[in-house]
Amino acid sequence: MKLAYSSILFGSLTLGALICATGCTDIDQFPEDRLSPESYFHSEAELRQATNAFYSLEPQVGSMRWYNEHSEMIQHEVLPRELIGSRPLPSAGSDVGWTWTTLRDINYYLQNSGRCTNAQARNHYDGVAYFFRAYFYYDMLTKFGELPWYDQPIGSADTELLSKPRDSRDVIINHIIEDCDRAFDLLLPFGKNTTEVCAWTALALKSRATLFEGTFRKYHAGTVFNPESLSGDHLLEICADTSLKLMKEGGYSLYSDGAEPYRDLFATLTPRSCEVIWARIYGDQIGGKHNANDDSKTRFASMTKRFANLYLMNDGSRFTDNPNWKTMSFVDECANRDPRMSQTLLTPGYKQMGQTNVQVPNINVTQGCYQYIKYVMSDDYDAFNQSRASMPIFRLAEVYLNYAEALAELGRLTQADLDLSINKLRARVNMPAMDLATANANPDSYMMSEEWGYPNVTRSNYTGSILEIRRERLIELSLELVHYNDILRWREGKVYEKPFYGIYFPGEGKYDLTGDGKDNVCIYTGKRPSGLGLKFLELNKDIFLSEGDHGFAVRYSSDAFKRNWNENRDYLYGIPTNERILTGGALSQNPGWNDNLSF
């Protein structure tokens, strides 16, 4: 007999999962002669060993690299299928992450952890397990929507459960909230831990998940993804309350040391524990290494004009209110901006950590877009796959942003709320505070525009503040693996069809990109001109401009990179065909995905 969900069939922890090393704690190999629950789950060490395997759910160093996040804000040499609109209907679960092995292991652990008589240890590691079950289901919810909820390991005899239909989004988000609450209560006595799950990690996840689902329902009301227009307001209330609790009781504060605190927050081996709630760490012995330095300089990673335009002037005014913003030189557009711009992008005067020389943007690699420097440390880490900067998964700044956005979407944000949240982020970099009345009285037409903005934003008395909170979110959380889900929940997938623009160039000629009065880039046609210390780019070969002979640099200018976003399909992945067949149609298909099955 064929059985569905082959990855959750058997009720014993897999050896492979249990010997999986994580970036958090050391773990001994699981003893092959003691795999049965009767002889396992009795000691604190065994509970720790079992739950350490769940850290495999952390964002990994491979395809889900923080600095390799794709969006309308950052691009790389290869466009992902999600942005192109060409992802196929998956045949197998492994094609799109419809895999349940870790959930099985979590449920198996929770079924058997009671064998340990050490109540303190059992509470701690049960809390870890509940957190990771919530974390697993949150990730699956964002990808697939409705899901079958399992809170027990499934065996081959459980034919009814194996053919279980998908539960509603309501059921899934409520279980996520319940598991986060269980995790918080069980973990609270054990204090904070930046590199392992703690009580405050559970609240941070609850804040993120309820904001996602609350706004997803709001912006997809009346669409195929929420045809009954189910309200998400109660979830936004939970998000605001949860975020405020973490803000007031968690004991975290924004990292603000040094002259460039935002840059230094990410360019460090050790997470800044005052702000970072949970992080993945890297090194020779734990977590491996990554490629942030090398990707920034040589791997075609670049940020777009759309992203650069978001940064306010340092007096709090909008850059795009300047009538000449479209034709400003690189040096001029980078002057007098929000300090986070120069702490995220390579701007005139940039010096790499430990260096004295000013670096020129490598537009040969970025194809005329903006080079990122977030996570970039000293040149000791420049070689391929040698970076070790720690990567935050949750930090206080996101909780501030969640809190403010939830209240703005509910229509009850106050100036006091902004002062508790958004304005602390601005104060960190000496930016003027956001004024609620001013923002709401004058919504940013640029950020609402079809060409450059997010036109689906709520039209209400709070439109202006919602837009400004989004601005802060986009700037503050860039390259932190949250933005794709923001696009999903805001119903703004059409943004991926817009051109990916970079720096403005008025045409052929030599340009100074460092602001020192010396030319360092030359754009030419025909015969290459002479000149020392210049990077040469041949027009329509090495660099393409939006108006042909002048304009914004364009990434992916050829027809081969045309993009299409299907509003009635692409906000969810398709359910794998094989899984639908194995359940005899008990698993329904997501909107817009035609698998040619008769059920």
Image (cartoon, grey):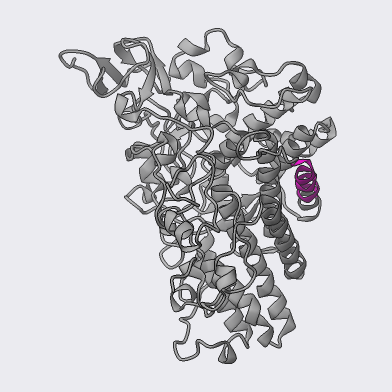
Given the current orientation, which residue lies at the most extreme top position?
323
**What is the x, y in percent for residue 234?**
79, 45
Residue 172 in the figure: left or right of residue 22: right
Does residue 282 appear anywhere in the picture? Answer: no
Vertical arrangement, residue 254 with respect to residue 438, above or below: below
Residue 538 in the figure: left or right of residue 422: left
Residue 529: which quarter of the image?
top left
The residue shown at (71%, 65%) is 183
Along the line of sight, the residue nearer the viewer: 253 or 124: 124
Vertical arrangement, residue 512 with respect to residue 42, above or below: above
Q: Main secondary structure of the magenta part?
A: helix
Question: In which quadrant of the rendered image does the N terminus lie?
Answer: bottom left
Along the line of sight, the residue nearer the viewer: 153 or 279: 153
**What is the x, y in percent for residue 489?**
62, 38
Given the current orientation, which residue lies at the most extreme front position?
598
Q: Is residue 142 magenta?
A: no
Residue 541: which quarter of the image?
top left
Residue 404 in the figure: left or right of residue 587: right
Does residue 108 appear anywhere in the picture? Answer: yes
Vertical arrangement, residue 46 with respect to residue 495, above or below: below
The residue shown at (75%, 70%) is 186
Numbered-mark total: 0
The stretch of residues the image draws in magenta is 232-244
**What is the x, y in percent for residue 275?**
66, 50
Residue 78: which quarter of the image?
top left
Q: Is residue 243 magenta?
A: yes
Residue 526 in the figure: left or right of residue 406: left
Along the line of sight, the residue nearer the viewer: 503 or 209: 209
**What is the x, y in percent for residue 447?**
61, 21
Vertical arrangement, residue 292 with respect to residue 564, above or below: below
